[in-house]
Image: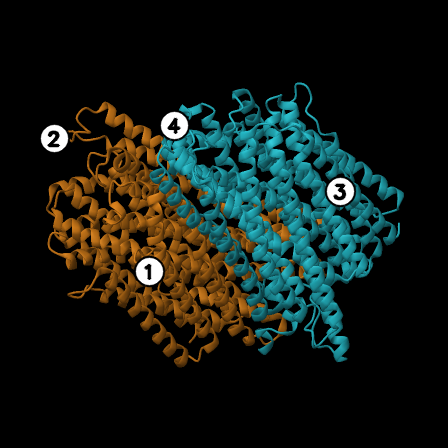
Chain colours: A cyan, B orange
Amino acid sequence: MTITIAYIMAISVSLISFGVAYYFYLWVKKQPSSNETIHKIGDLISKGTSTFLRREYLLLARFAGVAAILIFIFLPSPIWTGNPSKNIIMAACYIFGTCLSAMAGKVGITVSTIANMKTAEAATKGIRPSFLSGFRGGAVMGMSVVGGTLLGVTIVYALTGGEPSAILGFSFGASSLALFAKAGGGIFTKTADISADIVGKVELGIPEDDPRNPAVIADNVGDNVGDVAGMGADLFDSNVASMAAALVIASSLGKGDFQVMVFCYAAIGLLASAVGVLAARMGKNASPTLALNMSTYVTTGIFAGLTAIATWLFNFEWRVWGAMTVGLLVGTVIGVVSDYFTNDNKPPVRYVANASKTGPAFTILSGMSYGFLSVLPSMIGIGVSALAAYKLCEPLATTPDQAASFGMFGIAMAAVGMLSIVGMVISNDAYGPIVDNARGLVEMGHLGDKALDITDSLDSAGNTVKAVTKGFAIGAAGLTIIALLGAFMSQVNVAVDQLNAEAGKILYEKIISFDLLNPLVFFGLLTGAAIPAVFSAMLMLGVDRNAQRMVAEIHRQFREIIGLKEGKEGVTPEYNKCIDIATVGALKELVPAGVMAIVVTLAVGFIGGVQAIGGFLAGNIVSGLLLALFMSNAGGLWDNGKKFIEAGNHGGKGSDAHKAAVVGDTVGDPFKDTAGPSLNTQVTVVSLVATLMATLFLTTNLMNLF
Amino acid sequence: MTITIAYIMAISVSLISFGVAYYFYLWVKKQPSSNETIHKIGDLISKGTSTFLRREYLLLARFAGVAAILIFIFLPSPIWTGNPSKNIIMAACYIFGTCLSAMAGKVGITVSTIANMKTAEAATKGIRPSFLSGFRGGAVMGMSVVGGTLLGVTIVYALTGGEPSAILGFSFGASSLALFAKAGGGIFTKTADISADIVGKVELGIPEDDPRNPAVIADNVGDNVGDVAGMGADLFDSNVASMAAALVIASSLGKGDFQVMVFCYAAIGLLASAVGVLAARMGKNASPTLALNMSTYVTTGIFAGLTAIATWLFNFEWRVWGAMTVGLLVGTVIGVVSDYFTNDNKPPVRYVANASKTGPAFTILSGMSYGFLSVLPSMIGIGVSALAAYKLCEPLATTPDQAASFGMFGIAMAAVGMLSIVGMVISNDAYGPIVDNARGLVEMGHLGDKALDITDSLDSAGNTVKAVTKGFAIGAAGLTIIALLGAFMSQVNVAVDQLNAEAGKILYEKIISFDLLNPLVFFGLLTGAAIPAVFSAMLMLGVDRNAQRMVAEIHRQFREIIGLKEGKEGVTPEYNKCIDIATVGALKELVPAGVMAIVVTLAVGFIGGVQAIGGFLAGNIVSGLLLALFMSNAGGLWDNGKKFIEAGNHGGKGSDAHKAAVVGDTVGDPFKDTAGPSLNTQVTVVSLVATLMATLFLTTNLMNLF
């Protein structure tokens, strides 16, 4: 297979996936929705979502503009030293990446704000049509995001002739936008969720999604901007970064056939996802969880089979195929672990629910403890898979000094393998907030208890699957960023060769290792490890501050709007005030954390040079994975612990155990939906910044002075 | 200066410090104590403390016996392959280390259970005599622990002629006992503290230290076994490990003059501490915090001056002196950072106290966030100091291949420098639980409000200083374990030389790096980083389970003992039942976590060999430091946030903000007093196990099969 055929294959599959997405979009639009209340509320949600997204994108456009100018001036090498056309290309690719990432979010929320109404209405007819509306709504997002990834990477790679700086610029564009979109969406959604719960559930004892609650629409808007738009941007960025890492390493090795494999396997993954998504249906007596899992299994099976055939047909390296399969396997392991720690049928959730009887302190302590325990199997799994993928591909090297790069390519392919079925993963993931919203619409539209039961069971399936897909996303990011460490080394060595050739003598030494006994590496390691903690803290404090503002506003409305608390006919709260607070607050709080991560990376690089950055990236990866797994699992555990009690255990709703569990859930919310999932992106962005700046860090740093 | 003179100097200073300790002990004993109630309660505390310690030491003796037998059979090399006399010496040194560590705890609690009564009684006479009783009680511990360290290390080193395996065995003995003593004491103290608070303060609204509370004596016993005995064993072990790391590296370099410097500087540090402790007094209008800090400054000043003179007089290397001074400086930085995040005059505590008004979830979220923020300056500080110390000592190498070892020696000396004033640190630290206990005795003995005010203010000074000394202990452990990574490499390379010489050919390659791009190192890094999280989780779950048992027992007593709740004359609770629950539970829960850490280390070593262990140690250090700093600072912050509210802010005692702050404090208790401070020891133990097993990991591992 030549690279041109691989490009054509990738582009064709992208177009197919867009076709599937469009078909689903039309199908969802065609579903009936006649209830007027639902329409009215749905419009409010849709309008709030669009407003936030517009304002967020306006802010980010300015950020991206500044970044593009900086890239144009300084990267891949300062404009006065190198080839300006390369700078223009890189800046253009960067902007292209941000635009595609933004579009991923936009498409997702456009369809999800329609699908939620259809799903709510369909719930009056039964669980099967309701499930299908929710799932196909999510699949629009899944198919278009992954189609966009593949199309974008292919276009950039084909047009620039496989220029590494261009693909890295594109990936950085996708990631930097995702970083802010996730952080902003995460702060918005948890501000609204926590505030609505605290005043509604805890203080006043009114049900979730009660229309009297001024924050209820903001809460639904939050589901869209946080879980749909944010998660879409996040997986878009992981997906691009994994391909970028594999392509950059392959290009530094001059292995054209490896590049072909990356495109070919990625295309097959998308094709398999499309089939899986089309096949997804609830059986007569089946549960929605089973239907979601079944379609994932179908996708995985098709993918493994088709890639094996392709490998045999086109004479690809079986070792690379093996590395990719290792990635798929470990994705499953992490999923199973996440499920064990967050499923309310398993001991951890039961233990925490039981501990809640003694008070909120025990809910927190036991939940945190299980969160900490949950990291071990996943960390070992990622470590073992990296080791296996590396060892599989290392023997492909023809000269010993290339062994490390071949090994790192194996790790990158494991990440590609794990992300190959990402179309399916995003579809499952976007299903969650759609049915969550649908549940709210059923409640607010008074569609009856039967419909509420149906959306409740769809929602619960969404929660279970969500924990698994989150583990998946973290694992994939983990492998991607380990591979990016390899890409960083490749880029440094390419620069070394170039600079030495220009100077006609040995100016710089090639990097052959990042040695833990080198104190620069260790200094980087310690600093890098602190960044995810600081980043999480800044986001959580953002939520904390913002939620306090919103709680004050909700209190004001209940105090000042006469008849609101009593639910007097015709009295509605000022929903927009709450949406506005969440919007303004999120926009204010989203910037500092992301900028901090980037600035510290630059500082470490310009102070300690490439060795310090090597340690910095490793420390960042390790502590980022640790905290992301911990936060995501602890948060999921608390959420389901609360749900378990609400289902009537340990005294049920309103009991002391329930109050304690609500505290746990409130702490867990920003863990699992703000800080935890943003950490992937933070680590990816930092890795990409380092890789982009490789040459500058090599030539310009404080340590060079000694 | 010859090594013999250095030995004599070290032994003489040890004897002086024992003299100072004995003088203080007699002084404390001589102080009046006539109040009968206090005597009765003091005896109960003393008896409970001794009982726990005896049962704990009996359990640990069995553990140590098994470990000694294993060492005898397998270390430094299996008895059938090497020189059996070396094995006997190592096992003997190991036992010697455990005995000294145990004695450090025993001495501490013997005097603290007397000093608390004297301090309580002295409080009726004024703050200055009361302060002096508390401080001198603590100083007995400080002087005897550090005297014991120096004497023990000197004896082992002198008698074995500087055999590295002997000193490592001694250090491992000290650390392994400290690991279990800290964990056991930490579980005991927090079980009792949390249970007493939950039922007493939260449910019944009775004051702290109310004699009606069945857990009140157990709480006081906990202060002794956790904070006094545990902290004593912990700092004993850090102190020994830092000297061991420096000595092992110096010996592998064949640098006798470096060994002389280690003993000389350590002796000067102890001398300076003795002078500082003797000089400590409260001025007329001074605060106890100032008195504690002043004596630390005096010690530091004397130390810096005397070591400079010694360096000049004996022609020591100024670069080594510089590395040591860097350690002292960074210790101060970490102290200042800890103070900022935990002092109730500073913004973080104020913010968390204010957030508590919105409920416990916000107390937790904001406290955790500040805990995460607090790690950055300290991690950077440790990284920079390691870098500076390394770069200072690297140029002392005469051949390039020794540069890394010289650099690592610099880091070890920075740790020695940071720990040089440890005699002072322990004195300050042991002061805390003594005055805390004294406060309880004043309350229970009805010594009047004035005395209560005095002990309150002494207690508060203890809390502030404690946060600083904890930061100090963590920083010192951090540098020590980085140096132990160097010691591990030295030991591996010594083994490589020996094995190759025996075989007459190159069987193994020397280690020159632990490369982050090596997937074995990365696998180790990820696994090692997960261990501190799992270790903390196991300890916290231990506290959680144990506290639930004790809360049930307290409820039973209040239900079944008639007249107890009403405080009827002559009705006393069954204090011993609670002490017994805490004892049995702590002994049950202390073993698994420590054993887990050791077993995983062995597994990684036998699977991945020395490269995997190199990564494992680095991952362990990074995540251990991260979590220890986070937990210690967040815990201190919540504690002082609660105290700030209790001082009458935000509604004071009994308000909703106070209830939320109590939840924060309850979560923070096992953070700062169980898991956090045990992490140092966990990381040290793991590093020592790896260093001891270096030869076996080199020759016997799964990767050798490939």
> Which residue is drawn at the image coordinates 47% and 61% (left, top)?
B479
In the image, which is nearer the foreground, mark 3 or mark 4? 3
Q: Mark 4 touching mark 2, by CB under 8 A? A: no
Mark 4, residue position: A654
Mark 3, residue position: A18
Q: Crowding at label 3, few (<14), some or many (≥20) Cα neighbours within 10 Å?
A: many
Q: CA distance from mark 3 to mark 4?
A: 47 Å
Helix, strand, or loop for circle 1?
helix
Residue extending farthest to the front is A570
In the image, which is nearer the foreground, mark 2 or mark 3? 3
Q: CA distance from mark 2 to mark 3?
A: 83 Å
Mark 1, residue position: B425
User: Is residue B110 shown left or right of residue A296?
Assistant: left
Q: Is residue A412 in view?
A: yes
In the image, which is nearer the foreground, mark 1 or mark 4? 4
Q: Chain of mark 3?
A: A
Q: Is residue B528 in view?
A: no
Please state the total of marks drawn on the protein image: 4
Three-letter code for the amino acid on which mark 1 is drawn: Val
When the figure is inspected, residue A638 is found, relative to residue A404, above or below; the finding is above
Q: Crowding at label 2, few (<14), some or many (≥20) Cα neighbours within 10 Å?
A: few
Mark 2, residue position: B569
Residue A246: x %, y % from top left: 74, 54
Three-letter code for the amino acid on which mark 2 is drawn: Glu
Q: Chain of mark 4?
A: A
Q: Earlier in the sequence, mark 1 or mark 2?
A: 1
Helix, strand, or loop for circle 3?
helix
